[in-house]
Amino acid sequence: MSKFRYIYLAVVFVLGACAYGSVDLGNGKYTQASAITGQGGIYKVGNPYKIMGKWYYPKEDYSYKEVGVASWYGEDFHAKRTANGEKYDMYSLTAAHRTLPLPSIVKVTNLENGRSLVLRVNDRGPYAKNRIIDVSKRASQLLGFQAQGTTKVRVEVMEKESKALKAALTGESVEEDVYLVQEKAPILSSENLGGISYPKGSYFVQVGSYSQKAGAQSVASQLDVDSNIYYVNVNGQNYYRVRVGPFSNEKEAEVALAKIKNRGAYDAKIVTD
């Protein structure tokens, strides 16, 4: 795999903890959320098990959607191991579920205020009062129900993100053509890259595209893989794209994409040039 190093367009700004995504606060308002990253866990579905006289049957279910009550858990479990061996961090965007594979990616919507959030399911539970999901302390704050303790939510599995996460942890191949996306906007030229060129038809993993350089620089600084910021002007609007690559073929890009999504960059996609 050939790689090229490009020069950042500007110095890195020191910003507060920033996200790869955002929390939908309802009414068209968004706030940044911290990245969802695993800490040494494995992928597992698990065998049927019995808690308080009730049987639970874990399985892969990429069509899963359920409405019910959510709760949250914090200090009593902070820094302890989750059901799949990760280290629980009550300040990360994670959750516990009774039957979904560990880890899985879900979208949780608070039906009482309209806020929604993407969470990484890495633990088992809850088992009290027919609750369907137990989110981290930070997630409960962003979803707006920490003080009241519980809320009515809709939980939906994010299929592509969950499959990519499984592939990253198990080494399985991701499905062909699932993540290949052709950009409609103009691709960066060698002129934009300071005169440095790369082979035609190269693949990149694009982590995100930002209208402000500072936002792109902050995201790039949080990735623990080599990344570069590319500038492009589309219809008079400047964009700063955080990309990893180039890769010589699609399969290499797919492996990189799965690993990057596993680190929390769930909007990342493959683009070609």
Image: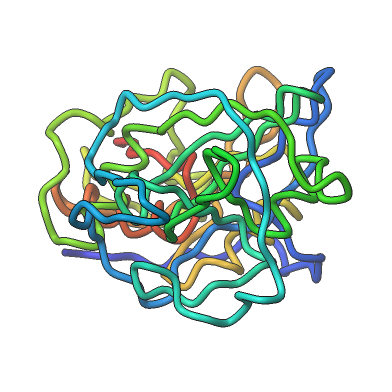
The quadrant of the image that shows the N terminus is bottom left
Whether residue 203 appears in this view of the structure is no
In the displayed structure image, the side of residue 116 where residue 224 appears, left or right: left
Left or right, residue 8 beside residue 149: left
The answer to which of 70 and 115 lies nearer the viewer is 70
Vertical order, 213 against 11 (above or below): above
Q: Is residue 128 above or below residue 16?
A: above
- The residue depicted at 39 percent of the width and 57 percent of the height is 262
Hey, which quadrant is residue 52 in on the image?
Answer: bottom left
Position of residue 184 in the picture relative to residue 148 (left or right): left
Q: Can residue 126 be seen in this view?
A: yes
Marks counted in the figure total: 0
Residue at left offset 14%, top offset 60%: 171
Q: Where is residue 168 in the image (x, y as percent from the top left)?
A: 25, 58
The image quadrant of residue 38 is bottom left
Q: Quadrant of the C terminus?
A: top left
In this view, the residue farthest toward the bottom is 79
Which of the pair 76/136 is nearer the observer? 76
In percent of the image, x 26 and y 42: which residue is there?
163
Q: Where is residue 238 in the image (x, y as percent from the top left)?
A: 69, 34
Considering depth in this image, is 162 or 140 the residue closer to the camera? 140
Q: In the displayed structure, would residue 188 be above or below residue 125? A: above
Q: x, y percentage for residue 212?
A: 75, 44
Q: Which of 33 and 105 is in front in this view?
A: 105
Q: Which residue lies furthest to the right in this view?
A: 147
Say which residue appears at 58% left-offset and 82% top-offset. 79
